[in-house]
Image (cartoon, rainbow, N blue to C red):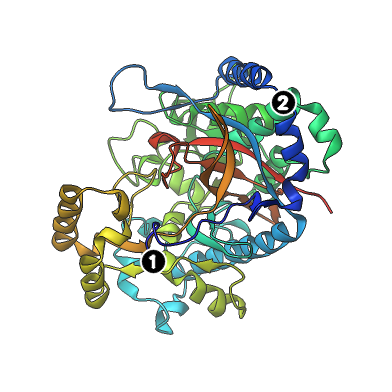
Amino acid sequence: MSAKQAPIFNEMMNGVDTRAAYQNLEQWYRSMPSELRSLKQSEAEDLFRRVGITFAVYGEGGDPERLIPFDMFPRVLTASEWRKLDRGIRQRAAALNAFLCDVYGRREIIRAGRIPEHLVTNNEAYEKAAIGFMPPGGVFSHIVGVDLVRTGPDQFYVLEDNCRTPSGVSYMLQNREIMMRMFPQLFMENRIAPVDGYAGLLKKTLGSVAPKKCQNEPNIVILTPGQFNSAYYEHSFLADLMGVELVEGQDLFVEGDFVWMKTTEGPKKVDVIYRRIDDSFLDPLCFRPDSMLGVPGLMNVYRSGGVTICSAPGAGVADDKAIYTYVPEMIRFYLGEEPVLENVPTWQCAKKDDCKYVLEHLPKLVVKEVHGSGGYGMLVGPKADKSTIEAFEAKIRAKPENYIAQPTLALSACPTFVEEGIAPRHVDLRPYCLVGEKIELVPGGLTRVALTEGSLVVNSSQGGGVKDTWVLAE
């Protein structure tokens, strides 16, 4: 079904009536003079600029640092809606981690014929260096970002999983901080579940998977590629919130069975590394020999139990877009449960019949690169011109295994401030699930909004913005 044919679910309105969850916000919006709204929008932008909430876009010329667009109209989820999402996200995170432990171990799901072996072993994210190794607590992916879209009152779909280093949580936290600062009365009048416990839960999660060789309080660090990385602000923000050191590869070294951090008081042992760099750059002795971002010898220490790397090297094989289609099967296989949240129906171009269907229906479909991210390498058929569609057709014919396709879902719309007042704009949601000794989840997540009318692309790198996400308390 194309986006033009499908009805759009408006999360605020039920026909001409305002849904109960949004009634207080409607009153708030209607009672706000346009001059005050403009003033508050400027105030929000000043706050974002002051604390340095930016992201980087390279390759477009000019200053790559951009201020992320912030929409002041919150997105609201009821307690009952969140309960279902919470259950489904926890279930999915558990299954994805069971899958990772299995494919680097006994490969029972492959031997049972439930997932094709080549999708795993030929996957560029499948790290041979992790085969046969069980990370502490049996956890490969410690921070799972599950991207969700909504199409109706009770219809939520998982668009994709992010098992490596999902970004954006700093926006979730700062959106809430700024809204509370600008509109304290709103939070007094509405019972909104808090998100400010995230940093404490993250630190607790990371500490819970410290290696067995760690005898004392674990020393946790965040490993960043450095200030030129597009998410550097988030790395430093989380380090500050958790009270841990932000380090680059050059700040760490391996000696004996451990990883050490250089300090003014001498070397200090590191127990847990929350890495925000890709697998291939982690250790030049194991992966890319030209990497200047990693730590030589890190993998040897990791495999000998001297340090924990979060998320574990090799976790990316679980969030590959071709593997995504098998997550419901993982849930049944490992957990013996039916999935709480559905996948978006997906065609794998590697399959001959699927590819034939996709090529015949390109103008109606969304096509994605299996290893793509950030909204790049993607075709939104209903919004594409003829030449773009033809170019994508040639790419698919040349390397069908590199692509999947999905129907153009009618993403739900939320009220968003525009010049003339408010108007519906398409949104998605990324909650952040923490997996350690326990599975933890703060209520809500990052809502991304496609600010251009009619657009379905919410990525900040593609012109999308962010807004606060409210989960109403019981």
Task: Mark 1 or mark 2: name the one nearer the start of the chain.
Answer: 1
Q: Residues within 10 Å of mark 2 (few under 14, many from 20)?
A: few
Which disc is residue 309 wearing? none
In the shown orientation, is residue 397 left or right of residue 424? Answer: left
Q: Which quarter of the rendered picture does the C terminus lie within?
A: bottom right
- The image position of residue 22, as x and y in percent, is 72, 46
Q: Nearer the viewer, residue 451 or 125?
A: 451
Compared to residue 308, the image places residue 73 above or below, namely: above
Q: Give the residue drawn at x 64%, y 21%.
A: 34
State the SS at label 1.
loop
Contact between labelled residues 2 and 1, with CB atoms less than 8 Å apart: no
Q: Which residue is mark 1?
A: 1
Indicate the quadrant where residue 114 lies.
Answer: bottom left
Seen from the viewer's position, the closer of residues 110 and 192 is 192
Decide if residue 110 is in sight here.
yes
The residue positioned 49% from the left and 67% from the top of the image is 343
Q: Residue at x 36, y 17 (%)?
A: 63
The type of residue carrying mark 1 is Met
For marks 1 and 2, give the CA distance.
Answer: 39 Å
Q: Is residue 306 visible?
A: no
* Residue 116, quarter of picture: bottom left
Q: Nearer the viewer, residue 287 or 464?
A: 464
Q: State whether residue 339 is above or below residue 85.
A: below
- The quarter of the rendered structure image containing the N terminus is bottom left
Query: Which three-letter amino acid code belongs to the residue tagged 2?
Result: Met
At label 1, counting other C-alpha atoms closer than 10 Å, the crowd grade (few under 14, some 14-19, many 20 or more) is: few
Question: Which x, y percent locates residue 74?
Answer: 66, 39
Pointer 2 residue: 32
Image quadrant where residue 240 sits: top right
Front residue of 218 and 97: 97
Q: What number of labels is visible?
A: 2
